[in-house]
Amino acid sequence: MKQPSEFQAVPDTDRIERLERDLRFHPSTTVDPQRLTLEQIGEFNRDGYLMPIRVFGDEEIAATRAYFDDLLTRVLAAGGSSYSISTAHLKHGRVYDLLTDPRIVDLVSDLLGPDIVAWGSHFFCKLPQDGQRVAWHQDASYWPLTPSKTVTVWLAVDDADVGNGCMRFLTGSHHFGHLTYRPSTPDEHNVLDQTVDNPLQYGSPVDVALKAGQVSIHSDLLLHGSEANTSERRRCGLTLRYCAADVRAELDWSEKGVVVRGCDPSGHWANPPRPSVD
């Protein structure tokens, strides 16, 4: 079976739009968090994101960076791009280990509940002076998932700041539900293919500056994007995607979901094993 990618081409986007999906924000109802505080859960419900949160120390993230450096070299040599390493946990054991790391799953479980599925892993690597941006968008527009109980953990592999094109969030924009978007035009130099126009009517922008080893967490309905990297420094982040186990996935996307906390009583998610090779 062909493995589904995290961000599909326009024809598949059309198929996703025809699906019946519950694209409302479902706030966290956790009252006894294990890693986050009740104040942080309130902030997530209000703002749609949390940041920064330190997960990995300097030595651990340096080892992850060295691993990614080697992986990127191999992907580029094979004709891929710095943005094409997607659904990586089905191919690379080291990425599977990051996706299932209990320190990250603890954070997600405090937001989504006791039964958690990890289904996505995608490196977004802006090379120095690469000239590409990410237009304002909602992740939920790209994903055939329902209901909308999915979060992204963005792990900084490199330091990310305004100078090298860090993410930007629109605070509170997740409360507006699923927003209208249009296909991006070539002159936008968009890594993806959707653009939400006039985004500032939905919230106040905030720069997601992270040190390597820190993470941010955001709702799948939060508007976000990033400007091009015009610096001489690389900006690499690994997006790790999680949902509550009661989320349903269409178009074979259930094939890539790994149960990382609790259980999946319905057996909807395939729960593939760790890849044996890196």
Image: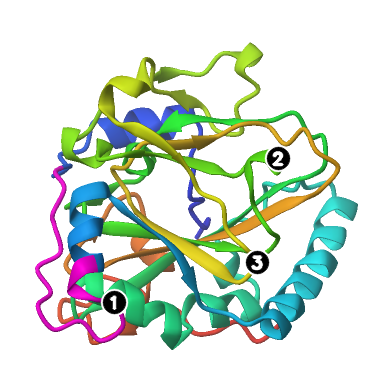
How far across and down, in percent of the image, does residue 64 sit?
A: 71, 75
Residue 213 in view in this figure: yes
Q: Main secondary structure of the magenta part?
A: loop
Sequence-wise, which precedes: disc 2 or disc 1?
1
Query: What residue type is disc 3 on?
Result: Ala
Sequence-wise, which precedes: disc 1 or disc 3?
1
The tag on residue 212 is 3
Split into 4 quadrants, where in the image is the C terminus?
bottom right
As helix, strand or loop, the secondary structure at mark 2 comes to helix
How far across and down, in percent of the image, does residue 141 sit?
A: 33, 36
Residues at marks 1 and 3 touching, judged by CB atoms closer than 8 Å = no
The residue sitting at the right extreme is: 77
Residue that badge 2 annotates: 163
- Count every numbered label the image shows and give the total: 3
Colour pattern of the rendering: rainbow
Separation (CA) of disc 2 from disc 1: 30 Å
Give the magenta-colored segment's residue range: 24-39
Q: Residue at x 50, y 65 (%)?
A: 215
Query: What residue type is disc 2 on?
Result: Gly
How far across and down, in percent of the image, does residue 126 sit?
A: 72, 44
In the rendered image, which quarter is residue 228 located in? top right
> Vertical placement of 221 versus 268: above or below?
above
Residue that badge 1 annotates: 36
How far across and down, in percent of the image, does residue 163 sit?
A: 70, 40
Label 1 crowding class (10 Å Cα cut-off): few <14, some 14-19, many 20+?
some
Separation (CA) of disc 1 from disc 3: 20 Å
